[in-house]
Amino acid sequence: MSANSRLTIAAHALAWIGLYQRQGHEVATSEQIASSVNTNPVVIRRLLGDLRRAGLVESRRGVGAGWTLARDLEAMTLLDVYEAVETGPLFALHRAAPDPGCVVGHGIQPAMRRVYDGIEKTLRSELARVTLEDVLGDVLAAPR
Amino acid sequence: MSANSRLTIAAHALAWIGLYQRQGHEVATSEQIASSVNTNPVVIRRLLGDLRRAGLVESRRGVGAGWTLARDLEAMTLLDVYEAVETGPLFALHRAAPDPGCVVGHGIQPAMRRVYDGIEKTLRSELARVTLEDVLGDVLAAPR
DNA sequence: TTCTGTCGCAACCATACCTGTTACGACGGC
DNA sequence: GCCGTCGTAACAGGTATGGTTGCGACAGAA
């Protein structure tokens, strides 16, 4: 599976904004964040747009514009971020419906859905256990 | 995320072969399985090729060729199948390395990797808990 | 009012992966 | 030699992601 890095980048951006505000600055610009992430500012704006729609950050426009956290990193979990930036399910069922006349084709989808639902539930509880404050703490604890 | 259905199709194929053999047949052809899955036989052959390389199925060639299970469904878990058909990690880190001169850019990757490693470990234990025999049982228990 | 810096967003391209399809050689039993 | 099936390459189409450019919208400052 070609995994995507949206969750990683979103967590990076949030931790960056949180640290920047903690250092006394009011707003962070997409260009500053993009510089730390090493990507294009538009990529950051797109992602932060998702986070804004999820109520995790706010944006100001005009001169001196930029991004601020909508709530403290302590009150934000990776599950919030995951739900804001990820769309579909982890595993998909058949693209085209299997043969309903076949016993296996008939019963395989509910069987697999049950497994996948359990996995997604576990995944969510794992993500919900980690706050962005935890992430930032881990980041700052990295050896130089 | 655009999930892929490889795990679903692989489980479908294995359950189908298992049931077919249980009904007294020796080998299953990719065309029969493709008919139940509702896809092209080459797709099935490609997937079963992965499963063969993982030691889950065997193939015969020549006239009367086809596929057989390499071991009982009871001794096969969804984790075996997952590892056979899925390649990369569930979540990716940055595509391009973040700015190492930035505190966040420096520490974000080990921090996220720790989270992702924990999640993958949990995912694997969930998948390892389900045998293909469980799946087939669930399939056969589906209401008509 | 005008200027300036930033966001918002559309458009486009490149890449990568997955799925489906066609084609054809390899194999092995008859 | 014939035939059915696998093995695999090649290609096309769809989709997701990421990178880039361009430009209008906005809001504060001069």
Image: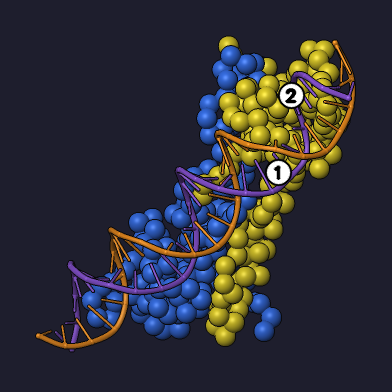
Chain colours: A yellow, B blue, C purple, D orange
Name which residue lies at 38% across and 69% down. Answer: B42
Same chain letter for marks 2 and 1:
yes
Using the numbered discs, state the Cα–Cα distance from disc 2 to disc 1 in whole angstroms.
20 Å
Q: In this view, does A2 lie to the left or right of B57?
A: right
The image shows residue B126, relative to residue A32, as above or below, that is: below
Q: Can residue B110 be seen?
A: no
Return the residue nearer the eye: A40 or A97. A40
Residue topped by disc 1:
A85
The residue tagged with tag 2: helix, strand or loop?
A: loop
Residue B126 x, y percent position in the rendering = 61, 51
The image shows residue B23, relative to residue A135, as above or below, that is: below
The local crowd at label 2, few if under 14, some if 14 to 19, many if 20 or more residues have their Cα within 10 Å, is: some
Residue A40 x, y percent position in the rendering = 61, 31
Residue topped by disc 2:
A29
Residue A25 x, y percent position in the rendering = 81, 15
Q: Which amino acid does label 2 sit on?
A: Thr
The local crowd at label 1, few if under 14, some if 14 to 19, many if 20 or more residues have their Cα within 10 Å, is: many
The disc, 2 or 1, on the residue closer to the chain's N-terminal end is 2
- CB of mark 2 within 8 Å of CB of mark 1? no
User: Mark 2, mark 1: which one is toward the viewer?
Assistant: 2
Name which residue lies at 58% across and 20% down. Answer: B99
Name which residue lies at 65% across and 30% down. Answer: A41
Name which residue lies at 68% across and 21% down. Answer: A32
Quadrant of the rendered structure where residue B45 is? bottom left
Q: Residue A118 carries which label?
A: none
Return the residue nearer the eye: B80 or A48. A48
Q: What residue type is labelled 1?
A: Val
The residue tagged with tag 1: helix, strand or loop?
A: helix
Dot 1: chain letter:
A
